[in-house]
Image (cartoon, grey):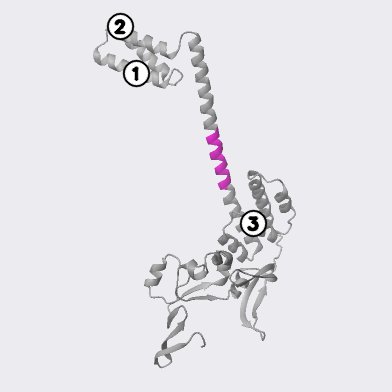
Amino acid sequence: MGAFPFALSATDGAARTGVLHTPRGEIRTPAFMPVGTAGTVKALTVDQVRSSGADILLGNTYHLMLRPTAERISRLGGLHRFMRWERPILTDSGGFQVMSLSDIAKVTDEVRLPGGGRAVSLSGVARGVAGAAHNDPAGRLRVEVDERPDETPVDGRTRQLEREYRAVVEEILELRGDDGRVSAFLRAIVEPGALADSSGYSPDLTFEQRVELLETLDVTERLALALRFQRERLTELQLRRKIREEVREGADQQQREYFLRKQLESIQRELGEDSESVSQEYREKIEAAGMPEDVSAQALKELSRLERLGEQSAEAGTIRSYLDWLIAVPW
């Protein structure tokens, strides 16, 4: 097998075991190959994968191209360094996934990536369901595709979903301070399928949500799905605005109360009724009232509360009435 020689170890009827020799290490066959679609095996660390006895990992070129992207992997030193896996890695071509997960597409550009790799830019034409794949005489991958162009429903539910979707997105744009250009773009879309697809432009949708929209062929169901995603975003934005407003109103109320207290204190000083003179007057009256020791201690405790809370507090009137009553009792 050229650079990858295979050594047969044992046979038993049609079954056999062997070792495939690669520059990155030996692969024992039959092979246990954990799946690391996007460059990682879910729920396992690299050390745990090694301890499982795996000789090789499986990756998916299409998903790696989408995320974390070929450019980022190249900057980090290649796929082996990115995955911290020094043993062999098998990646499929990704051609089938390009057709099954995305639109029927035309290749609009081909670029060379850092490190010598190649990538293509695709322009979507219509949705389709991929069928059998095969190589043509020139060695190119050909996939049979059942094209699924959008059909425009005329039922009332679809029209209602259209109206709700537009209203929700308009409210989101208003909350985000849109200057009108996105709103104009949205109003120019007349087909319900294209309207639902416009959710793909939202920076708030996750990659998984975009794929779910892409895979939904029925126009009405796709529009309902897009509406659900946008409603979730609207709820989040409204909650954030409510919190900001409550915080701002609370701060404004505290500021108003502070200025009012300062104004009242200034007026009281002008009238000779500042809080210090009031406290001193109560202290002298308590000492002169001849109260029992425990009662005097309680009165001074309440006077300290009055000084701490201030004359403008809700409890000030109650404390003063209590102190007046204690002073008036003929001890």
Q: Name which of mark 1 and mark 3 comes first in the sequence.
A: 3
Relative to 245, residue 135 above or below: below
Cβ–Cβ under 8 Å for marks 3 and 2: no
Amino acid carrying label 1: it is Glu
Residue 201: x and y, percent? Answer: 65, 57
Question: Per the image, is 242 magenta?
Answer: yes
Q: Which residue is mark 1?
A: 302
Horizontal and vertical percent for residue 143? 64, 78
Going from N to C along the chain, the mark reached first, 3 or 2, is: 3
- Local crowd size for mark 1, using a 10 Å CA cut-off: few (<14), some (14–19), many (≥20): some
Residue at the disc numbered 2: 288
Highlighted magenta segment, given as a residue range: 235-248
Q: Which residue occupies 42% across, 16% down?
A: 317
- Please say if 16 is above or below 177: below
Q: Which mark is residue 209?
A: none
* Quadrant position of the C terminus in the picture: top left
